[in-house]
Image (spheres, rainbow, N blue to C red):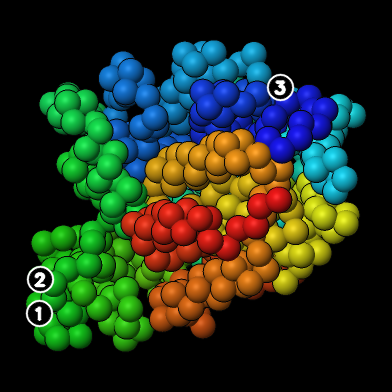
Amino acid sequence: MADSPATDVDVVVVGAGMAGLFALHHFRALGFSAIVLEAGDGVGGTWYWNRYPGARCDVPSLEYSYGFSEELQQEWEWSEVFPAQPELERYFNHVADRFDLRRDIRLNTRVTSATFDDEARTWAVETEQGDRFVARFVVMATGPLSVPNVPAIPGRDEFRGTVLQTSRWPDGDLGLEGKRIGLIGTGSSGVQTTPELAALADHLYVFQRTPTYTWPSHNGPLDPEVQEAWKRDYVECRRNQRRTFGGVTGSTGAIILAMPGERAILEATDEERLAMVDERGFDASRAWSDVARDPEANELGAELYREMVRRTVKDPELAESLSPRGFPIGCKRPVIDSSYFETFNRDDVTLVDLRKGGIERITETGIETEQGHFELDVIVFATGFDAMTGALARIDVRGRDGAPLRDEWAAGPRTYLGLQVAGFPNLFTVSGPGSPSVLGNMVVSSEHHVEWIGACLVHMRERGYATVEPTDDAQDAWVEHVNEIAQGTMFIAPTCSSWYVGANIPGKPRVFMPYVGGLPAYIDRVEEIVANDYEGFAFT
Ligand code: FAD
Ligand code: NAP
C-alpha cells in the first residue's frame, strides 16, 4: 500500500455467515490479515440463527455450497436434495474448522460503529463491549436477511407463555409437544414450519394476514449417483452456476421452480390451461412464457394456482382463505414447501384468516383478534426481516467528513454494483443492495463478491493505492440502471408489497433493492468495469 498506517489488522469482516467465513479464508490466502466480528455465539449466520423446525434451504445442497475449494467439495457428503438447517450448520462449522478460521473469529461481538479517519485513511470499528479495531478495510458481510422484524403488536410482553421468533430460535428441546401453538406469519419461514409445528402441537393456529404462493419442494434423499456426477465435474458445474440467471443450474435433477414454458397462457384455451394443472400441479401456474411479464397472463396463472389450492384443501371456504389474490405471482420471493396446504386438512390445525378480522393485541393467555380470543401456550413469530439494509442501518457507519451512511441512504440504499458506496472509501458490502444477492443462489453471488473484493485489494497493493471508492456519477448511473431494469417486472407491480421494496417495515423507503438482471449480466458488467481499469472507481 502507499503508506502503511498503524492498524490492528488489514481487514475487519463483520459477520461469520457464509460470506464472512469465505472472506476470512480468501483474504488470508491473498496475504492480508483479517478478523471476523460476529454477534452470534456460533458461525453460519442464517444457518446458526434460523433453527426453527422445518428450516431448510430451497436451493439444492450440491449447488448451495462453496466452490472455492476442490478438496472441500470432494470431501463433503450431502444427504438430502434440499439440506435442512442442522446439516447446513454442520457444514459451515466444518468449513470453520477445516480452514482453521476460528482463531480469527470473535463470537458474541456485535459491531456498533465503523468510522473512517480521513487523515489516517483507516477505519475504526467499535463493538458493544467497547473493543476497538483499526483496519485499512471493512467488509460488511452482515447478511441481507439477518435482522428480525418484530411487529409492534400491543401486549407482547404480557403473554405468560413462551414467545419464539423463527429467526432467533433457541437451541435444544423447547418442549413444544402437546402445546397450543399460535404461528404469526406465512412467508417462507412460516410455511416451512407449519407442518412441523402441526406435528408437535396439540393444536396449531396459523394467523395469516396474506396468503402465499408456495410450490412443493419434492425434497428427498440425494441420489448418490447425482452427487458422484457433480463431484466428477465440479469445476464445470461451478462455472455453469455463474452463467445461469439465478446461480442454480438445475443439473442436480432436483425439481425446482418451473421455468417459463414456450407457450403463452393468453393463447391457450380454458381446457388447455386445466390440462396443464392435471399434468404439472402447482407448477402449472408458472409454466408459460407470458406469466412473468404480462399482468393479465399472470392473473390467469394465479387462477391455475388457486385451482390447485382448491384441489388440495378439502374445505372450500378454507381453500379460498388460503388462496392468494390481488397481487401477482413473482412479486414476492417464491416460497417452497413440504405439504403446506395438506397440513390444513388436519383437525388439529386452524387457519385464522386475519382478513376477516385482524390481531388486536396479545394477552396474558393468547391472541385477541377481531374474530375472538385464541388461548395459547406458545406464540411463534415468523414475521420476516428488515431486509437488505437492516443490519447496516443498525451500525453507525460514518464515511468521509463523518457523513453517516444512515443519512446517505435515508431515501433508499445507493451503491455502485452493491459493492461500495460513494463517500465511504475502503468499505465493501457483500450482497449489498444493487447486486443480484437475494434473487438467486446466494453462495454463488457471495463468492463472486468476496473474490472481487480480494482482487481489488491486491490491485491496490500492487499499485500502492491507499483508498478506493466509487465516483458519484458511476453510482448514480448504476442506481438508475438497477431501477430501469426492474421496470415491467412483477417485483414492482403497483399491487405488489414485499420486503424486496421494504414494504414490510413501517417507515422504510419504498425502493426495489436487488439487481434484477441476473448473474451472467451482472458478472459480465463487473468484469468489464475491471477490464476498463476499474471504471467508475476512484483510487488515491
Ligand atoms: P448471514 O448468513 O445472514 O450472516 C450474517 C452474519 O452477520 C450473521 O451471523 C449476523 O449475526 C452477523 N451480523 C450482522 N450484523 C452484525 C453486527 N452489527 N455485528 C456483528 N455481527 C453482525 N439463500 C439462498 O440462496 N437459498 C436459500 O435456500 C436460502 N434460504 C434461506 C432460509 C432462511 C431461513 C433465511 C433467513 C435466508 C435464506 N437464504 C437463502 C438467504 C441467506 O441469508 C443466504 O443464503 C446466506 O446465508 C447469507 O449469508 P451471509 O453470510 O451473507 O449472511
Ligand atoms: P416474510 O416473507 O417477510 O414473511 C413474513 C410473514 O409475516 C408474512 O406472512 C407477513 O404478512 C407476516 N407478518 C408480518 N407482520 C405481521 C403482523 N404484524 N401481523 C400478522 N402477520 C404479519 O419473512 P420470512 O418468512 O422469514 O422470509 C423472509 C425471506 O427469508 C424469504 O423471502 C427468503 O428469502 C428467506 N427464507 C428462505 C427460506 C427457504 O425456503 N429457503 C426459508 C425462510 C426464509 P404480510 O405478507 O401480510 O406482510
Q: Circle 2 sits on which residue? A: 275
Location of residue 370 in the rendering, given as x and y in whole percent from the top left corner: 67, 68
Q: Circle 1 sits on which residue? A: 271
Location of residue 356 in the rendering, given as x and y in whole percent from the top left corner: 57, 72
Mark 1 → mark 2, Cα distance in angstroms: 6 Å
Q: In this view, does 495 lie to the left or right of 61?
A: right
Badge 3 amino acid: Arg
Location of residue 436 in the rendering, given as x and y in whole percent from the top left corner: 46, 57
Q: Name which residue lies at 35% across and 83% down.
A: 295
**Mark number, residue 106:** 3
The residue nearer to you, when weighing 466 against 524, is: 466
Instruction: Kindly state the secondary structure of the residue where label 2 is placed.
Output: helix
Mark 3 → mark 1, Cα distance in angstroms: 61 Å
Instruction: Kindly state the secondary structure of the residue where label 1 is placed.
Output: helix
Do the CB atoms of the residues marked 3 and 1 lie less than 8 Å apart?
Answer: no
Instruction: Kindly state the secondary structure of the residue where label 3 is placed.
Output: strand
The residue nearer to you, when weighing 144 against 36, is: 36
